[in-house]
Amino acid sequence: MKSKGSATQYVMVELKAKVDDLAPIRNKLTQYGANDIGIYHQYDIYYQVPKGRLKLRITENESTGELIYYEREDVARAKTSFDYILKIPHPHAVKEIFEKIMKTKTVVEKIREIYQYENVQVHLDKVKSLGSFVEFECITSQNLRQQKKDRSKLEKLGEKLDIRCNRLESLSYSDLISE
C-alpha cells in the first residue's frame, strides 16, 4: 500500500464466485470467527475510460464516497489487482460533474455484507439483476512470491467455504451487467 497524494495505491489479490445462497457462507464465516463489519447499500457508477476501470462508489447513508480506479486481468481464479482509492466528500456532487464530462458505462447496485476473516475481507453481495456473489479481497505486496501465497490463501478459503471452482467469475459486475 502506497499513498500518492491523498489517493492510496493498493496491490490486492481477489477472488469472486457466483453462488446460489449466501446463508451457508455467512454461517461458516460466523463459525470460523470472522468479524461482521456491516451491511451497506452501494451504488458503483462505472465510467468509460481508455484503460482499466473507473468507478465512483456511493454508499447509502454515508457522507463520503470513494473514487476507485483499478487494473486487473479478467480470469476465473484468484488474481492480482492494482487499485487507487480516493476517499471523497460530497460524492453526489462528484457524480454530477462526472456526468457532464464522462460517459457512464453502467451502474451496479448491490447490498454488500462485509466480514473480516484474518487478513481477508469477505463480501457477500446481492447484485441487482445479477444475483448473489461472494468476493474475497486481500491487500498484498509488489512481491510476486507474496502475491502467489495470498492468491493460494484465497483459493483455500474458497474451498473451506465450499465455493465451487466452476462458479468462479472472471469479470467485474459492470462487465457482467453490460453483457
Image: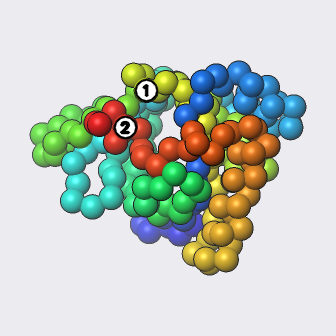
The location of residue 122, given as percent across then percent down, is 66, 41
Please say whether residue 91 is visible from this viewpoint.
no
Q: Is residue 178 left or right of residue 112?
A: left
Callout 1 secondary element: loop
Residue 45 in which image quadrant: top left
Q: Are marks 1 and 2 in contact (CB under 8 Å)?
A: yes
* Amino acid beneath label 1: Leu
On screen, 177 above or below 12? above
Checking the image for residue 130, the label placed there is: 1
Question: Which residue bears the numbered disc 2?
Answer: 176
> Which image quarter: residue 104?
top left
Label 1: how many Cα within 10 Å (few below 14, some 14–19, many 20+): some
Question: Tag 2 or tag 1, which sits nearer the N-term?
Answer: 1
Residue occupying image coordinates x 63% and y 45%: 165
Q: Relative to residue 73, is residue 90 depicted above or below? A: above
- Give the distance between the C-alpha atoms of the residues marked 1 and 2, in whole angstroms: 8 Å
Q: Which of 177/55 is in front? A: 177
Seen from the viewer's position, the closer of residues 149 and 83 is 149
Pick the residue in front: 16 or 3. 16
- Across and down, in percent, residue 61 comes to 48, 23
Q: Residue at x 50, y 44 (%)?
A: 169
In this view, the residue farthest toward the front is 166
Drawn side of residue 53 relative to residue 156, left or right: left
**Image coords of residue 159 (percent x, y):** 75, 45
Q: Position of residue 23 (x, y in %)?
A: 71, 21
What residue do we see at 34% from left, 42% from top? 175
